[in-house]
Amino acid sequence: MTERALRLGTRRSALAMAQSGQVAQAVRRLTGRAVELVEITTYGDTSREHLAQIGGTGVFVTALRDALLRGDVDFAVHSLKDLPTAQPEDLTLAAVPLREDPRDALVARDGLTLDRLAAASPRGAARIGTGSPRRMAQLNAYARSHGLSIETVPIRGNVDTRIGYVRSGELDAVVLAAAGLNRLGRTDEVTDFLSVDFVLPAPGQGALAIECAAVNADLAAALAELDDPHTRAAVTAERSLLAALEAGCSAPVGALADLLADGQVVTEMRLRGVVGTTDGSTMVQLSTTGPVPTSHGDAIALGRELASEMLAKGAAGLMGERAL
């Protein structure tokens, strides 16, 4: 008797469908079972308010998780940066596959880089669109320190909508996650990749999360074959920092954990974090290093350590949105 197809819950956007389709292919190869995509609309997809207004925490994942718990789907794929930091007991984070490029990317008019754009705007200040307070804070801080003239403009919408603002001339540029553009096959539209040395990504950016119901142990074990331990350790440290700061998904917090190598041997993990006001006038940016985590607890401890240092430097007063 042929096993029924596995049902993969996904948001309806082109990006969500693309990344879920890639996971579906991997699961088919892994299990030999058919996988069908089940499109689910989330509150974050239907609301036109800015994420900070609707309390960005969980708005893109709650409907998917509800479908899992009802048994409407067998597993779900999320952009990991959208997940609340608290993991529900009745759901299992079965796999965090190998991370894509975590950087932010600029799509600007006339093929301009950030520095050239800010120096060549006919408006006086280059208008740059983003839906992220984190990006606003760091872009404005960079502009202040380099004498550049920019105006960050809050926007919502899918990739086509956002890039459309540039094509129409309404904005000079937009900032998007490089990973999403890569997964959509649209990297050729990027005019500048923003270095993580001055714009840290959102915690978990570039990584996917594959969830299933905790009671479905056999499926969880199968999906775990897609897990990349280095990616999981890195995003665990980043999300631990976010949780310890008690910040929501739309708070102006950036974090990135990366592995440091001595020759061919990985020796340490470095975690960098930043919190700032959206106008870029005040920033707390620190880093810490520690041994490569050998357990979930080690990665969590690294995040908490850095969060404690950042809070001691005044980070709490710079976050406009607390976790819900």
Image: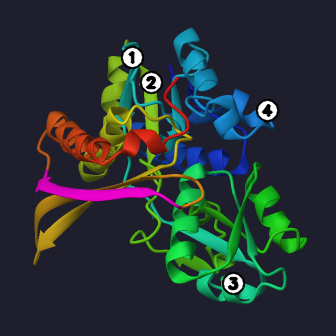
Alpha-carbon span between mark 4 and mark 2? 24 Å
Cβ atoms under marks 1 and 2 closer than 8 Å: yes
Cβ atoms under marks 3 and 4 closer than 8 Å: no
Q: Which residue is mark 1?
A: 216
- The amino acid on which the numbered mark 1 sits, given as a three-letter code, is Asn
Q: Could you tell me if residue 279 is visible in this image?
A: yes
Looking at the image, is mark 4 or mark 1 nearer the viewer? Answer: 4
Residue 143's place in the image compared with 9, above or below, is below
Residue 100's place in the image compared with 97, above or below, is below
Q: Residues within 10 Å of mark 4 (few under 14, many from 20)?
A: few
Depth check, front residue: 29 or 81: 81
Looking at the image, is mark 3 or mark 4 nearer the viewer? Answer: 3
User: Mark 3 or mark 4: which comes first in sequence?
Assistant: 4
Q: Which residue is mark 4?
A: 46
| Residue at position x 64%, y 81% in the image | 191
User: Mark 2 or mark 3: which comes first in sequence?
Assistant: 3
Disc sitting over residue 117 in the figure: 3
Helix, strand or loop at label 2? It is strand
Is 105 colored magenta in this rendering? Answer: no
Looking at the image, is mark 3 or mark 1 nearer the viewer? Answer: 3
Disc sitting over residue 212 in the figure: 2
User: Mark 4 or mark 1: which comes first in sequence?
Assistant: 4
